Amino acid sequence: MSRPLIGITAYLEAARWGDWIREAVLSPPAYAKAVARAGGAPVILPPMSPYAARDYVSGLRGIVLAGGAEVGAGTYGEQPEARVPEAQDHRDRFEIALARAAVEAGVPILAVARGMHVLNVAQGGSLIPWLPDVLDHDRHARQEPHVIQVSVSSRLGKAVGDRVEAVAPHTQSVRRLGSGLLAVAWADDQIVEGVELQGHPFGVGVQWHPERGQEFPLFDAFLEAAR
C-alpha cells in the first residue's frame, strides 16, 4: 500500500549553507520524521500564494499546520501587539487559506501550536494577542512542563489519554473559538490547549508539540484518518 502524502507547512526565510545566504523553505525535521514514522510520506509546503491552497489540498491526504511565529493580529481584527515579533503575513495568508481548503474538502488536519491558532482564525475565531496580560502569571511563556487535562471522549483524548505533560511556551492563546471548533484540552487555569473540528474526519489542534519525544500516538491517529 502506498504511503499517504502529508503536507507540512514551513517557513520562507533567509538561510546559510556554505558561503551562500539565500531565501529557503525551512521546516524542523521532527515533523517530517513523525509523519514518516506513522506511515506517511511527508511533503514540505512553501508558503507561497494562497491561491494554490486548493491545489495542494486536492493532491494530499492530510495537512500538518506546523508551529512557528505568532499569527498576526490583523488576521482576527485586532491591532498588532508591540511585544510580539512582526507577523509573517505571507505565511499567515497561505496557511489560513490552506486550513480553509482542507476543512472544506474534508482532508485530515493536525494543527500544532501556531497551527492551532491558524485553524482557529481560519474558522472565524480570535486569539489573545498577549496571554500574560489576561492572567496573573506568565507560566505559559516559560520553558517549564505543565499538565494538560484532555476530554477522554474526544478524538484527542482517545489518542493521548486524559492528561498530557508538555513543555509548550506560548504568549498567544485561543480567545473565541472558531465555527465548528470545540475545546477538548485545558491547562489548570482553563486556557485552551486543544481543539477539535466537529463533523470533520480529523481536525485536531494542540498547543503543545506532539512531534517531539519518543512516542507519536497523535500522529498515528492522524495518519490512520489520512489512510
Image (cartoon, rainbow, N blue to C red):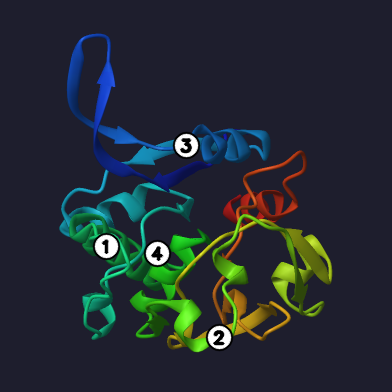
Query: Residue 120 location in percent, x, y?
Result: 43, 77
Q: Are marks 2 and 3 in contact (CB under 8 Å)?
A: no
Find disc 1 in the rendering and name its residue: 92
Dot 4 crowding, Cα within 10 Å, few <14, some 14–19, many 20+ = many
The label on residue 28 is 3
Q: Does 181 sit left or right of 153 as displayed? A: left
* Eye-nearest disc, 1 or 2: 2
Find disc 2 in the rendering and name its residue: 135
Residue 127 versus residue 109: which sits nearer the camera? Answer: 127
Query: Which of the two discs, 4 and 2, labels the residue nearer the N terminus?
Result: 4
Q: What's the distance in space between the residues labelled 4 and 2, CA to CA? A: 33 Å
The label on residue 38 is none
Q: Secondary structure at mark 4?
A: helix
Residue type at numbered disc 2: Leu
* Eye-nearest disc, 2 or 3: 2
Query: Which of the two discs, 3 and 1, labels the residue nearer the N terminus?
Result: 3
Q: Secondary structure at mark 2?
A: loop
Residue 19 versus residue 100: which sits nearer the camera? Answer: 19
Q: Are marks 1 and 2 in contact (CB under 8 Å)?
A: no
Q: What's the distance in space between the residues labelled 2 and 3, CA to CA? A: 31 Å
Q: Tell me, yes or no, if residue 182 can be seen here.
A: yes
Q: Secondary structure at mark 3?
A: loop
Query: Which of the two discs, 4 and 1, labels the residue nearer the N terminus?
Result: 1
Total marks in image: 4
* Eye-nearest disc, 4 or 2: 2
Residue at the spot x=54%, y=74% of the render? Answer: 200
Q: What's the distance in space between the residues labelled 3 and 1, CA to CA? A: 18 Å
Query: Residue 187 location in percent, x, y?
Result: 69, 77
Residue at the spot x=32%, y=66% of the render? Answer: 84
